[in-house]
Image (cartoon, rainbow, N blue to C red):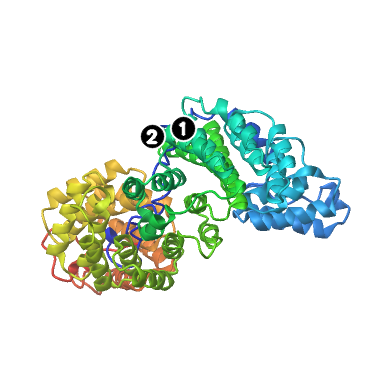
């Protein structure tokens, strides 16, 4: 569930962005949940990618300067394409970057760097043009893979074998080559040779089960059913828990008359990846038909394997401190780029590769490339069984991008088809909460909770959080408090919950000491969360701890200098500290940063009071806005709207 950050309500109602990608945030185990790949060496992965990165523009790179020999030659169209390509690359628009650098390469054929850039971005964009550009590139892994893929798609299997075998050796190719080589041989009708290629790989202590599974698929596709059954039997319990493996093994179990076991296996996978719930019926139907019917699908799964292993590496690293170091940051960037290339190659070979498609979308979303993440989902075949999953993810992305009405309508359409899907109800609650439709959001969350097939546990705190927000926004504070405390029992160390509950208690005049302890815990758990810092500083100041709250608010404004709510908070703190001129300056800043109507009303009232105070038109207590005095007494029924929000 991804509770959105609303633009209305109190400071406490700045909803936390709970990480949309349920798919991305579930470790993709390929061998019974064990971390399979040793820590990828930056040098090893760099041998695959870095030769392509040389000269590739980043966000700091500029277009060719006027001193460039090419620009001096007066080729203005070239300079324009270099500029377009650089800007597109900095914005993550790989398709546009590939087109621009491809044009530049044609305008200046003697400058190989432009062709290399076009090739690199073609791979990242998943464009077939990469295969056409590959022969002109310096010798390396990626050009050989691109040419091998192009040959496979054209049915030139012997050529594909040549390119896959010719690719230079490194750790990545050590994983890929046996699968690519074997599937290309199967494409050429050489089943026995393909199985022989995989035989040594099957002995691998970590990935042996996965190679055995592919050997079984090749034997089955080559008409060696008895051999396939033996290999499927050997891979049982060895190959891992990715969706592809689950479906392959489930189909084989069905063929052996063990459908109950097959269904149990699929149910277990869906339980581990809740995002799949929307397509449960479609996924169950898939166990009655073969998963792989063409060799190119096997090739796609080879690239998918590497992507999943890299994703495990990144998942295990998530939140570690060493990514602040330049070398570590470079390593992570290289891993992410490699994962994207592997996924793009998988989808180029097999557009119906559902796992690659959703993982790619989630990865792009994590990089804040939401438009590209949505486009990745749009490329799926119309008859893809996971279309409901894609549509749910698209609605979530629409919500992230601010397309609130569109997201809500998409979710309602899906619910008409699957009214018993609690994940859809949860997502609809998020969308309605973001539109300030509190009653409708509450109904959606309560539907989701009612459909939960077990006692609320674990991540179900998110459902309760959404329900509590919807209750509180309708002035049902006692109900909201009870629900928040229930959520806190499920997730006692969630800083957003602690922040929300503590802030609400202060605004409703309940137990200031306990509220303060909740807030301090929230800040201790998330010291770098600037919005929590602002909320804690604001509440401490409201509790009369001006000297302690003021530095937190000053830090918040330093980190988010154009947030009208934070500027307003700091102005109030300055006013309460007796620094009236600075308070007015902050309010004047806040009014310029397009505050929402409620915040604008409060800022305007504060400025009006300050002007009247300066002119002697009010007494020290007369017409004093509620925010300009400590919240030490129980709040009136409407006073909980005195705070600001983001």
Question: Seen in the image, is 262 located left or right of residue 449?
Answer: right
Q: Position of residue 190 (x, y in %)?
A: 66, 38
313 lies above or below 251:
above
Q: Position of residue 302 (x, y in %)?
A: 56, 40
Q: Earlier in the sequence, mark 1 or mark 2?
A: 1
Q: Position of residue 619 (x, y in %)?
A: 19, 70
In the rendered structure, are the residues bearing label 1 and label 2 in contact, judged by CB atoms less than 8 Å apart?
Answer: yes
Q: Residue at x 24, y 70 (%)?
A: 443
Report the disc number at residue 237: 2
Report the disc number at residue 356: none
Q: Residue at x 49, y 50 (%)?
A: 290
Q: Position of residue 528 (x, y in %)?
A: 37, 44
**Could you tell me which secondary element the residue under label 1 belongs to?**
helix
Q: Residue at x 79, y 54 (%)?
A: 104
Gap in angstroms between the C-alphas marked 1 and 2: 8 Å
Q: Quadrant of residue 80?
A: bottom right
* Neighbourhood count class around disc 1 (C-alpha, 10 Å): few under 14, some 14–19, many 20 upward: many
Residue found at the very far front of the displayed protein: 226
Question: Seen in the image, is 92 located left or right of residue 269?
Answer: right
Please state, as top left, top right, bottom left or bottom right, where the N terminus lies in the image. bottom left
Q: Nearer the viewer, residue 79 or 142?
A: 142
Q: Nearer the viewer, residue 225 or 266?
A: 225
Q: Residue at x 68, y 46 (%)?
A: 152
Label 1 sits on residue: 209
Q: Nearer the viewer, residue 511 or 488?
A: 488
**Could you tell me which secondary element the residue under label 2 belongs to?**
loop
Question: Seen in the image, is 445 located left or right of residue 117?
Answer: left
194 lies above or below 121:
above
């Amino acid at each position: 569930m991804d509770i959105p950050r609303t633009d209305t309500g109190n400071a406490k109602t700045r909803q936390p962005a709970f990480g949309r990608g349920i798919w991305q945030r579930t470790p993709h185990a390929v061998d019974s949940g064990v971390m399979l790949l040793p820590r990828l060496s930056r040098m090893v992965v760099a041998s695959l990618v870095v030769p392509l990165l040389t000269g590739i523009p980043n966000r700091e790179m500029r277009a060719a300067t006027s001193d460039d020999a090419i620009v001096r030659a007066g080729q203005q169209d070239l300079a324009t394409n270099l500029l377009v390509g650089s800007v597109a690359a900095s914005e993550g628009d790989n398709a546009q970057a590939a087109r621009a650098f491809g044009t530049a390469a044609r305008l200046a054929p003697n400058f190989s760097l432009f062709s290399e850039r076009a090739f690199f971005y073609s791979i990242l964009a998943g464009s077939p043009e990469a295969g056409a550009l590959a022969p002109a590139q310096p010798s390396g892994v990626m050009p050989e893979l691109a040419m091998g893929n192009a040959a496979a798609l054209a049915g030139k299997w012997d050529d594909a074998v040549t390119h896959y075998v010719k690719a230079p050796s490194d750790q990545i190719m050590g994983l890929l080559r046996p699968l690519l080589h074997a599937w290309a041989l199967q494409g050429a009708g050489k089943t026995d040779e393909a199985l022989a290629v995989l035989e040594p790989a099957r002995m691998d202590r970590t990935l042996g089960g996965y190679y055995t599974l592919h050997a079984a698929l090749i034997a089955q596709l080559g008409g060696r059913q008895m051999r396939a059954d033996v290999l499927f039997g050997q891979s049982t319990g060895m190959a891992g828990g990715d969706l592809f493996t689950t479906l392959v093994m489930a189909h084989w179990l069905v063929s052996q008359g063990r459908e109950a076991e097959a269904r149990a296996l699929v149910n277990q996978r869906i339980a581990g990846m809740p995002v799949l719930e929307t397509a449960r019926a479609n996924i169950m139907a898939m166990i009655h038909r073969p998963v792989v019917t063409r060799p190119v699908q096997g090739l796609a799964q080879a690239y998918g394997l590497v992507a999943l292993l890299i994703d495990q590496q990144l998942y295990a690293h998530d939140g570690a401190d060493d990514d602040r170091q330049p070398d570590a940051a470079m390593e992570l960037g290289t891993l992410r780029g490699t994962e994207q290339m592997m996924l793009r190659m998988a989808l180029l070979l097999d557009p119906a590769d559902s796992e690659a498609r959703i993982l790619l979308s989630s990865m792009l979303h994590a990089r804040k490339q939401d438009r590209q993440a949505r486009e990745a989902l749009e490329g799926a075949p119309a008859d893809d069984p996971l279309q409901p999953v894609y549509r749910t993810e698209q609605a979530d992305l629409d919500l992230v991008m601010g397309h609130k009405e569109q997201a809500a309508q998409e979710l309602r359409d899906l619910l008409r088809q699957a009214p018993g899907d609690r994940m859809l109800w949860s997502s609809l609650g998020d969308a309605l909460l973001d539109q300030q439709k509190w009653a409708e959001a509450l109904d959606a969350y309560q539907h989701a909770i009612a459909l939960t097939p077990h006692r609320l546990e674990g991540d179900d705190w998110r459902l309760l959080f959404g329900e509590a927000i919807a209750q509180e926004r309708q002035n049902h504070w006692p109900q909201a408090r009870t629900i928040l405390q229930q959520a806190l029992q499920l997730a006692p160390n969630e800083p957003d919950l602690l922040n929300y509950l503590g802030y609400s208690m202060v605004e409703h005049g309940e137990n200031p000491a306990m509220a303060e302890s909740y807030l301090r815990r929230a800040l201790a758990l998330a010291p770098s969360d600037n919005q929590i810092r602002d909320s804690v500083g604001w509440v401490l100041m409201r509790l009369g701890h001006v000297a302690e709250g003021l530095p937190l608010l000053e830090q918040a404004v330093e980190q988010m200098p154009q947030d009208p709510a934070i500027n307003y908070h700091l102005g109030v703190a300055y006013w309460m500290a007796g620094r009236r001129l600075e308070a007015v300056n902050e309010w004047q800043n806040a009014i310029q940063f397009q505050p929402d109507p409620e915040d604008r009303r409060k800022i305007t009232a504060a400025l009006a009071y300050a002007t009247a105070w300066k002119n002697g038109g009010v007494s020290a207590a007369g017409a004093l806005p509620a925010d300009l005095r400590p919240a030490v007494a129980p709040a009136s029924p409407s006073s909980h709207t005195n705070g600001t929000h983001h």
